[in-house]
Image (tube, rainbow, N blue to C red):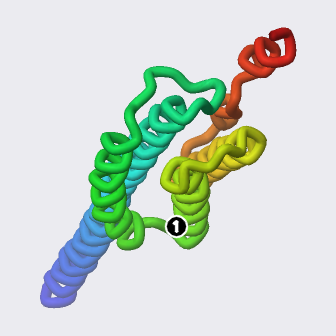
Amino acid sequence: MFLDQLATLLSVAVGAAGSYAATTLTERARWRRTKAERWDMKKFDVYAQYGNALKEQIWITQRTGAALGYAHVVDPLELTDGLRLLAEAEARRATRWESVLLVGDAATIAAARSWHEAIWTLELHVREQRQDAEGWTRDAQRVSQKRDDFYASARRDLGVTGPPPPSGNWPREWQQQDRTAG
């Protein structure tokens, strides 16, 4: 009788331990999955905000470049207004940069840095009021390539599958055709 009770007690103890272990492992896996999802969403937000901040700088640079006569850009913005807006946009970019440094992986941080440095190079045409149409086009094309590199890296870091979006090459093919035809 004692042995029967001992066997039953051991069966209950083993069952309880197994149940506890299974529940603990399941909860731990769920917690890790939830944590990874939260970080992925945070990274997505950080990368998107950073990309938008850089796009704002490009837009202001291009508009100010239009006032200086650079091709393939419209909606001219006077130099004094453009420089003021560029300073404000740079402050926003720098603030968002800190978040990229915090949550980004090394490859995406490097790609982000290359993109904003390429934008700074393009901005120099405006800041220094250069008259260098070929340099403007070359530097704008470099900005487009660095943008593509950033998004490819960010997509890899976020686990986005499938091919990347079409390239943002600038000037667009139709703009180049207009220039050679004119």
Q: Residue at x 60, y 58 (%)?
A: 121
Q: Which residue is mark 1?
A: 109
Q: Residue at x 61, y 40 (%)?
A: 161
Q: Secondary structure at mark 1?
A: helix
Residue 81: image location, x then y, percent: 31, 40
17 or 130, nearer to the observer: 130
Q: Would residue 65 be seen by someone viewing this image from the given angle?
A: yes
Residue 52: image location, x then y, percent: 39, 42
169 or 161, nearer to the observer: 169
Badge 1 amino acid: Ile
131 or 7, nearer to the observer: 131
Q: Position of 165 compared to 59: left or right?
A: right
Quarter of the figure that contains the N terminus: bottom left
Number of marks in the rendered image: 1
Residue 163: image location, x then y, percent: 69, 35
Residue 2: image location, x then y, percent: 13, 89
56 w.r.t. 178: above or below: below
Q: Position of 180 compared to 66: left or right?
A: right
Most extreme residue toward the right is 180
Q: Position of 66 compared to 60: left or right?
A: right
Q: Residue at x 40, y 41 (%)?
A: 79
Q: Residues within 10 Å of mark 1 (few under 14, many from 20)?
A: many
Q: Residue at x 68, y 32 (%)?
A: 170
29 w.r.t. 9: above or below: above
163 or 120, nearer to the observer: 120
Quarter of the figure that contains the C terminus: top right
175 w.r.t. 53: above or below: above
Q: Position of 162 compared to 155: left or right?
A: right
Q: Would residue 30 be seen by someone viewing this image from the given angle?
A: no
